[in-house]
Amino acid sequence: MARYFPPRVPRFASRTKITGRRHPPLTLRPLCGARPIAPGLPITIEAAKGVARKNGDYDMATIGTFTANSKGEFTGVIKTLTLNTKVIFRPVEKDGEKSPDFRVSTADMDIGAAWKKTSREGREYTSVKLDDPSFPAPVYATLSETDTAGQYALIWSR
């Protein structure tokens, strides 16, 4: 029997998955004992890590800046990737030993609480807990005075 039509070619399906290799081909892998591509880069990275370790701030981030006023309040702004809002720390009367010293609010909503504490070195700071239904988890931070008198930084770490 004679065949008049070309053989059938399968059509492209969007659900067809093409699996790639897990590793690059051997021709693209570095040889055993080969020099790095950028020879000074590892040294630079290690030097930067060392500086960060000495400063102690490599795993911390400032998310807010505040100023103190005569009423004992702290006013400022919290800025993160998802939050940019004016915030005020208002002092409150303590009901008990574990009660907060401040309520943290934005506009007419409370978004957290803060407690006055003293470090081992004798430096005063404020421990802050921010929480809101829009947050995936509570944010713990520290409000402490910067090198500039009257200026405070809100710093968080995980």
Image: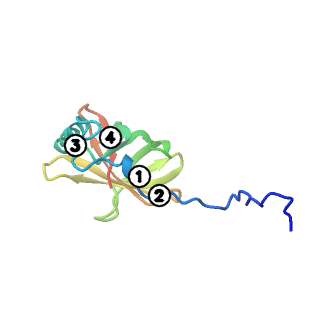
Residue at the image point whose x is 48% and y is 59% from the top: 136
In the rendering, at what x and y percent does residue 87 appear?
45, 43
Who is closer to the viewer here, 158 or 125? 158
Picture coordinates of residue 100 (x, y %)? 34, 58
- Label 3 Cα neighbours within 10 Å, binned few <14 / some 14-19 / many ≥20: few
Q: Secondary structure at mark 2?
A: loop
Assign a secondary structure to mark 3.
Answer: helix
Amino acid carrying label 2: it is Arg
Residue 49 numbered mark, or none: 3
**Mark 4 or 1, nearer chain start:** 1
Disc 4/disc 2 C-alpha distance (Å): 48 Å
User: Disc 4 versus disc 1: distance between alpha carbons?
Assistant: 50 Å
Q: Residues within 10 Å of mark 4 (few under 14, many from 20)?
A: many
Image x and y of residue 86, in percent = 48, 40
**Between 155 and 86, which is closer to the camera in this rendering?**
155
Residue, disc 2: 21
Q: Amino acid at mark 3?
A: Lys
